[in-house]
Amino acid sequence: MSDLLNSIPMLRTTISKLSSDMRFVGIFFIIVGVLYSVTIIGAILGIPLIISGLRLRESSDSFSSYMLSSDNNMLERALERQSRFFFIQKIFIIITLVFMVLYIIAIIVLIITVLPYLNTNMYYST
């Protein structure tokens, strides 16, 4: 597996670009997480964002180390860190979808509850 980088020339370029992009996205997630964490309620979202950003940065560093040393352990670590990042993001997506459904249900319940009390004649009172 260590000869993989030498046998596929495009792989080195792809891993290098992937590492660079992961570093940027990781920094972005960390910054957004810190901004969310300014408030107590925002910290509920901010701390996991910071952790996922750190995992992505660690994965990027491991990919860079793999490029330099061709050590399979570094490749394994990079993929493991990247899988943790995606796991955290999957949980975020599921939680977001659940809250969206609850929000839509709350809006429907509110409309159904308030609709009978609206008197159409109240706009035409003389």
Image (cartoon, rainbow, N blue to C red):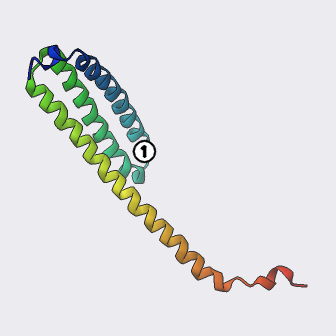
Q: Residue at x 27, y 43 (%)?
A: 86
In this rendering, is residue 28 above or below 102?
above
Would you say 29 lies left or right of 67 here?
right
Would you say 29 lies left or right of 80 here?
right
Would you say 2 lies left or right of 37 here?
left
Q: Residue at x 82, y 79 (%)?
A: 123
**Residue 112 location, x and y as percent?**
58, 80
Q: Residue at x 23, y 17 (%)?
A: 12
Front-lying residue, 41 or 32: 32
Residue that label 1 marks: 36
**Residue 84 location, x and y as percent?**
22, 42
**Mark 1 element type:** helix
- In terms of image quadrants, where is residue 34? top left
Residue at the far front: name it. Answer: 7
- The type of residue carrying mark 1 is Tyr
In this rendering, is residue 25 above or below 126?
above
**Residue 11 location, x and y as percent?**
23, 20
**Residue 47 location, x and y as percent?**
32, 45
Q: Residue at x 40, y 52 (%)?
A: 40
- In terms of image quadrants, where is residue 120? bottom right
